[in-house]
Amino acid sequence: MAHILLVEDDAQVGDLVRRYLEKEGLRVVWVRTGREALEEAWREKPDLVVLDRGLPDLEGLEVLKSLRALDPVLPVLLLTGKADEDSRVEGLLEGADDYLGKPFSLKELLARIRALLRRAGKEGRRRFGPLELDLEGRKAYLEGEPLKLSATEMNLLLALAQTPGRVFTREELLDRVWGPEFEGSERVVDAYVRLLRKKLKDDPHAPRFIETVVGLGYRFLGE
């Protein structure tokens, strides 16, 4: 589980972001000052820092410089009410990896965090309600219990879950899971989706995870 250090002095924003990220399967430590942030970063070594630029004790860029001295490759996403181009450029030049202006969408914040974690090679797990995927270990857990999936079933699940909400055609899934040299029928995809649904306890008429898009293919329901 990725460890996020959230540095935000606004109690309402901080609590909202913390609860949302934790619901999405991330471990979040929330602090409200720059000094607390540096102490926590030294002690716990987070995988990523979400850093508000306007803090009560230290300016966000000062904290950013200290974080960079502590760990030159630590991913840092700056939050700020200053949306002008000069402010964005200044933050990026000081070493921020990404920049998000306030007010912001929680879904966009999560997407940017996941992108930075992937880039840093630290995005090992993803959670979709009761389903948790261990991407590095290639394991799946439903309501905390490990699922017994074959290699092909796991490959299919990961292919679908990689981009929640996107419709994959049977041809695309054949290419991703079975490879371009596979010469069998596209109906093999349907057969494996049925197997997956059974193990996921997923009702095709009221799906939690895998939805059939009539005439097109399948879509994974998630973020």
Image (tube, rainbow, N blue to C red):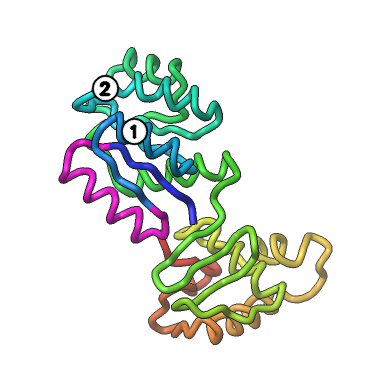
Residue 83, compared with residue 15, is above or below; it is above
Residue nearest the viewer, comparing 99 with 176: 99
Chain-order first, disc 2 or disc 1: 1
Crowdedness near tag 1: few (<14), some (14–19) or many (≥20) residues, C-alpha within 10 Å: many
Please name the amino acid that badge 1 sits on: Leu
Label 2 element class: loop
Left or right: 22, with 44 as reference point: left
Residue 41, given in percent of the width and then of the height, sits at 42, 37
Looking at the rendering, the stretch of residues picked out in magenta corresponds to 8-27
Residue 138 sits in quarter? bottom right
Q: Is residue 79 above or below residue 19?
A: above
What secondary structure is the magenta-colored segment mainly? helix
Q: For the point 47% across and 46% down, which residue is it?
A: 114
Q: Residue at x 55, y 30 (%)?
A: 73
| 70 and 16: which is toward the camera | 70
Residue 118 located within the stretch drawn in magenta:
no
Q: Element type at marker 1?
A: strand
Name the mark nearer the viewer: 2 or 1.
2
Please state the total of marks drawn on the protein image: 2
Q: Quadrant of residue 43?
A: top left
Q: CA distance from mark 2 to mark 1?
A: 12 Å
Residue at coordinates 57% horizontally, 63% vertically from top-left?
Answer: 134
The residue indicated by pointer 1 is: 51
Q: Nearer the viewer, residue 101 or 17?
A: 17
* Amino acid, disc 2: Leu
Q: Residue at x 56, y 47 (%)?
A: 122
Q: Position of residue 96 (x, y in %)?
A: 44, 25
Question: Residue 196, position in %: x, y?
Answer: 58, 80
Nearest the viewer among 120 and 62 is 62
Q: Which residue is mark 2?
A: 58
Position of the C terminus by quadrant: bottom left
Q: Quadrant of residue 88?
A: top left
